[in-house]
Image (spheres, rainbow, N blue to C red):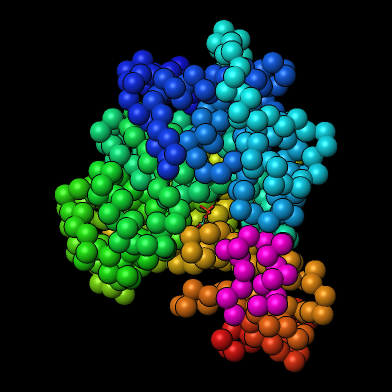
Amino acid sequence: MQTNVTCWLDETVKKYPEKIGFIDENRSITFSEIKNYALKTATALIVKNLFKKPIAIYMDKSVDELITFFGVAYSGNFYSPIDVDMPNSRIQKILEIFEPEVIITKKELWKKTKFDVEDTTVLFLEDIAKIEQDEKSVYLQRDKCCDTDLLYVLFTSGSTGIPKGVTICHQSVIDYIDWVEETFSINSDTIFGNQAPFYFDNSVLDIYTTVKTGALLYLIPQELFSWPIKLLEYLEQNKINTIFWVPSAMILVSKLKALTKVNLNGKLKKILFCGEVMPNKHLNIWRKYIPDATYANLYGPTEITDVCTYYIVDRTFGDAESLPIGKALMNTDILILNEENQLVGNNEIGELCVRGTSLSKGYYKNVEKTRQVFIQNPLNPYYIELIYRTGDLVKVNEFGEILYMGRKDFQIKHMGHRIELGEIETAISSIENISMNCCLYDEKKCKIIVFIEGEMSLNELNKKLENLIPEYMLPNKIIIVEKMPLNQNGKIDRTALKKLL
Ligand code: AMP
């Protein structure tokens, strides 16, 4: 019986000890080496008497970071990967919420930081590498774990400016990866090309399926995503046969006609994507140049462990048609509810809600936000059963497939990143000389537009915002208004502003 994701690593090491598991720009590592390093990390945490405790991982995206995830998991603690490129003030906010017992980092990286973490132990990867691993203690502690214990906490944008920590337990990941392996026939011949940052849950598929099946995972250098031809050449050279990317990354490739230059047909066999709408206009270009691949549109928020519905593309679509998000995964149930919390009727739009093992244990130390979206299943009056309200509006088409129709709130997806427009607005409110502001998203042009009452250029504004929010949240256009239009309730009239776009 499996209660912890590291059981996969144990099994894979028995089958393929010398097979390479992870490769980044600097190194490659076999499964038995992954296990050895992970056991050292686990030992370092167990010596400190830590069990079921928060561990922050402050590292560049690397093989080292992956090993550390497994080390934390072996020890029965849970991790949160902290993006090193995020502004310090936002990292500080996350650390204040997460309150890690330990931060695991690298010496070079730590030298450059200025976090206020007085009472937190900092462990360096370089020192952990010198530790003698205590396998017996690690396994004794791992045996105490339940599959409902947390594996990780991922922080996503929060509408009030405070990031929300989504908690996910081992059981949810075990269930999800079982499904991935079976549905897409992943095995030791699979070679993944990872695009997703580790603070984004798409990466969970790449990391854990690799370790479960003995596949090989390449961490594609980030800069290649600005050079589509080089990116495709990288896939070809490394014989990558499976990718799971955000549509934005795929769109860049089709837009810049890279597929006409590098022929990947017959080589790239499985093309999965998730995280935002995939326009058929672009998917059709991929399908034209790589006709033999299997394509799948996966859908889901972090709160339900990455994916809750999927559609394996099985027919042709016109450029303007929308691609279905399909049907529920095994062991997952989708309820589409109307405003009265009843199941919608034929052709009616409703909110997609999820039921099953994949559900998060709620937002980390945030009962209030948790209660707003993890609610009692309104269709079950008999016992406690939670569902997650995604905020996504959907309907079912004539084939019984779910279609994504949009959001019911101000959460957006911009270049694959999940952003609450409220978080940008809160950051802008803290800047002097701007009395009022409002952010809108221009979906056609993929631009974040900020309306302000005040005097400021986009450059000036973004210089100030750089220290407050991640680069991907910075507005792309500023519109100065003399007076912010207000609706009858005295709130900013977003509909009136939309007309100014
Ligand atoms: P995240 O938590 O970052 O994975 O973002 C989840 C949100 O991204 C969902 O609630 C949707 O709004 C959007 N999303 C994810 N996958 C898809 C998809 N395949 N099609 C359309 N929107 C998607």
Position of residue 437 relative to residue 211, above or below, is below
Query: Does residue 141 appear to the left or right of 205 in the view shown?
Result: right
The image shows a total of numbered marks equal to 0
Q: Which residues are magenta?
A: 459-477
The quarter of the rendered structure image containing the N terminus is top left
The residue located at (59%, 89%) in the rendering is: 500
Q: Position of residue 400 (x, y in %)?
A: 32, 57
Query: Does residue 116 appear to the left or right of 339 in the view shown?
Result: right
| Residue 494 visible here | no
| Residue 449 visible here | yes
The residue located at (64%, 40%) in the rendering is: 108
Between 168 and 404, the one nearer to me in the picture: 168
Position of residue 140 relative to residue 321, above or below, is above
Q: Position of residue 319 (x, y in %)?
A: 28, 73
Q: Residue furthest top?
A: 136
Q: Residue furthest bottom?
A: 482
The quarter of the rendered structure image containing the C terminus is bottom right
Between 115 and 180, the one nearer to me in the picture: 115
The residue located at (34%, 62%) in the rendering is: 228
Q: Quadrant of residue 142?
A: top right
Is residue 187 shown in magenta? no
Is residue 476 shown in magenta? yes
Position of residue 367 relative to residue 444, above or below, is above
